[in-house]
Amino acid sequence: MFVVDTLLHRLKRGCETMAYPDGPAPALPERHGGALRVDGSKCDDGCDACVSVCPTTAISRANGQPAVLDLGRCVFCAACVQACPTGAITQTGDHRMAVRRREDLVVGGRGAEEVRLAAELDATLMRLFGRSLRLRQVSAGGCNACEADTNVLGTIGWDLGRFGIQFVASPRHADGLLITGPVSRNMQRALRKTWDAVPEPRIVIAVGACAISGGLFAGHPEVHTGVESELPVDLYIPGCPPHPLTILDGLLRMLGRLDERRFPPRRRGAAATD
Amino acid sequence: MSGDTLFALLPNAGSLPWGDVPEWPAAEFVRRTAAELDRGARLCSWFGVPEDSGLGVRLVAIVAFDADNTLAVGRSLPVSGSVPSLTVLHPQAHLFEREVWEQHQLTPEGHPWLKPVRASAGEAPANGEFFRVDGGEVHEVAVGPVHAGIIEPGHFRFQCAGEEVIHLEIALGYQHRGIERALAGGPHRLTERQIETIAGDTTVAHATAYATVLESLAQGEAPLRAQWLRAIGLELERLANHTGDLGALAGDAAFLPTSAACGKLRGDFLNLTAALCGNRFGRGLVRPFAIGPDVDDALVARMMGNLTRALDDVEQAIAWLWDAALVRGRFENVGTVHRAQAEEIGMVGPAARACGLVRDVRYDHPAGWHRFAQAPVAVWPGGDVFARARVRSLEIQRSGDFLREQLGVPPEREATGGAPPLEGDTLAVALVEGWRGEVCHVAITNASGAFRRYKVTDPSFHNWPGLALALRGNAISDFPICNKSFSLSYCGFDL
């Protein structure tokens, strides 16, 4: 019997939704590496090995200053990690990278070796969105990788709906936009119209290097330099693309839904000691 | 047959001096290309190469004789102003000629529907006039660029009589990022990374085509182990996308068991790619001239275990789909593209194979690892949503078998040197069968070995007109299921 078979198969598979955040976060792929950490105090004088290998010029080093890495432009290729002769740039294995302020993505200075993770929304917005957040996604020149790994949050493994977060079809039904891509000129008007249709108060989430800084296409006349060139951004989630866990962490962090005392995040040994 | 061609023959992944490409005055070149297509060739790419002097542009045609396992190339003498249209004889040139017109202001005289492909008009694509059907009962439906759901932007203009779609015109360009323009003068520091994001879900196929072109331009070949790894990445990419799309199709037919299972299983395949290179989409997996990430026996064993589990689960989830009469009823005789139409518009990939066309680069034009290992070509007649879903479920089985076989036989590691210089004044072509179909990259270098022109043709460029044809005579409510059955790329088209 077809119906019975289907039901039996489903029963056999059981609940496939991960326990996180009411359990430890799933592991990132071993070779993913997670967030990057820059300890500028380890930079050798006059060394610019990382600067010259970075494809997106995310790393800069002013005269006499330590190296500074902008994770908003980073595509996480880890070329700098391999090139660094002193171990100043390391992978932490940490999936958490979302921030509320653009400058919090810039790492390397003293006391700013890592990203300064996102704070929750203010009290008014928390009251409105804390338990129910409806987002309209707009791809504005994205390559479909950020889109795909945002979409995946709706599958049974992640089940975004259990947090009261949902992607809706109409901007009129939305509390905000989640935007991917560098904002191509050809999407500028459509993005603006979509934004105009979202009732206030509203938030904007920029996902991926392109949306944050123009990413791989910054400087092309066909695109802008990310969402900020058009709209105010409330949450930045870096990556190329960010892992679904990084995106989910950003959303939950912004909504104050994480209790990290119970389940401390996974970190790589070396970086976890300081 | 290719035997009589006056074009220069070259194999997939081959190259030849730019000066050895036969040339004709433009009007005659268009006639000659039409003659090649008449005798069974297929247009892989058609583009302009601006002359160094700035005076005019040369047209280049890359055609494939699939049955003879060879490609052929020809070019025109520099031309400006206008040329006779190839589209009037062979509709498969339709978008190519519009693109050349847009990029080089070369007018194809007699082109039936000359309008922009992706150019900008201020803050939106320069879409131009849409084809309109007039009549008392006829109405027009405009959808997009922003669609319901997490999906890329594009504009669809339907001419309907009641529920029935008489005509659909698709206008794209919203994702245009200027990739081809930026490639000129390259390779640049960013080029490898940009190639990986031509279409984010087709990273391995595009990166493989790029690496192959570079290697061919340097008269070299990647280490066997790299070729092996690329072939594995390519099939993982196919598995992830086919699984995800079959789940999405099931969801559109309101059949949730398969939809739920496949949504998750797609991630299992992406995670296998991430096990190789850390990135779920295969960024960094393919490196020109180099092996890429290291793969040891322990990783192979772990991957084999995870792959087998995921394949077993997918097989079951898809079996539910084919068992369900409600799904078959929803898929059959919806969105039909006839074989003759598919041939005429030059469709590629699973969408073409679902029309009964045996067309698969891995089989017709094997390069890289596919010279040593092949999967049977999955073909199904019918041309409807059912056939497209069927081909993809067959390909899941065959890609799975291929992977299980190949994962176990990694070639020896070999020492690799640095990247040798690219030959100057050379043309190189690489075709790769991505999960949507034929990815075609063509590079032509200048005297110093930099790209004089780099042309990218994503399979979506061939197949979007297929979706438009599929909708004719169908209900407009069939659009989502038809669209998903093609699952074409917006950014891959828009570049």
Image (tube, rainbow, N blue to C red):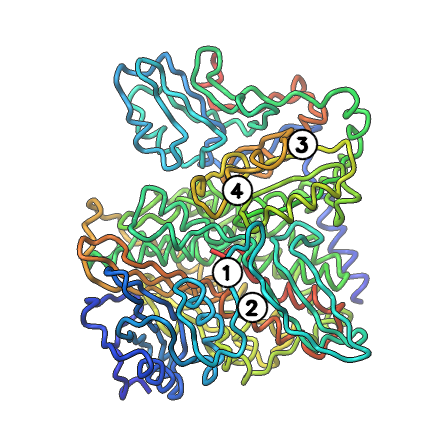
Residue that label 4 marks? A182
Instruction: Using a 10 Å C-alpha cutoff, classify the residue at mark 4 as few (fewer than 14 neighbours), some (14 to 19) or many (20 or more).
Output: many
Question: Which of the numbered marks, if any, corresponds to residue B464?
Answer: 2
Closer to us: B214 or B187 = B187
Q: Gap in Å between the C-alphas at discs 2 and 3? A: 35 Å
Q: Residue at x 67, y 37 (%)?
A: A18
Closer to us: B309 or A87 = A87
Query: Disc 2 is attached to a residue of which chain?
Result: B
Residue that label 1 marks? B493
Instruction: Using a 10 Å C-alpha cutoff, classify the residue at mark 3 as few (fewer than 14 neighbours), some (14 to 19) or many (20 or more).
Output: many
Q: Residue at x 19, y 72 (%)?
A: B20
Question: Which of the numbered marks, if any, corresponds to residue B7?
Answer: none
Q: Gap in Å between the C-alphas at discs 4 and 2? A: 24 Å
Question: Which of the numbered marks, if any, corresponds to residue A251?
Answer: 3
Proximity of marks 1 and 2: CB atoms separated by less than 8 Å: yes
Secondary structure, mark 2, is helix
Name the spot of residue A196 as percent of width and height, x first: 72, 41
The reply to whether label 4 and label 3 mark residues of one chain is yes
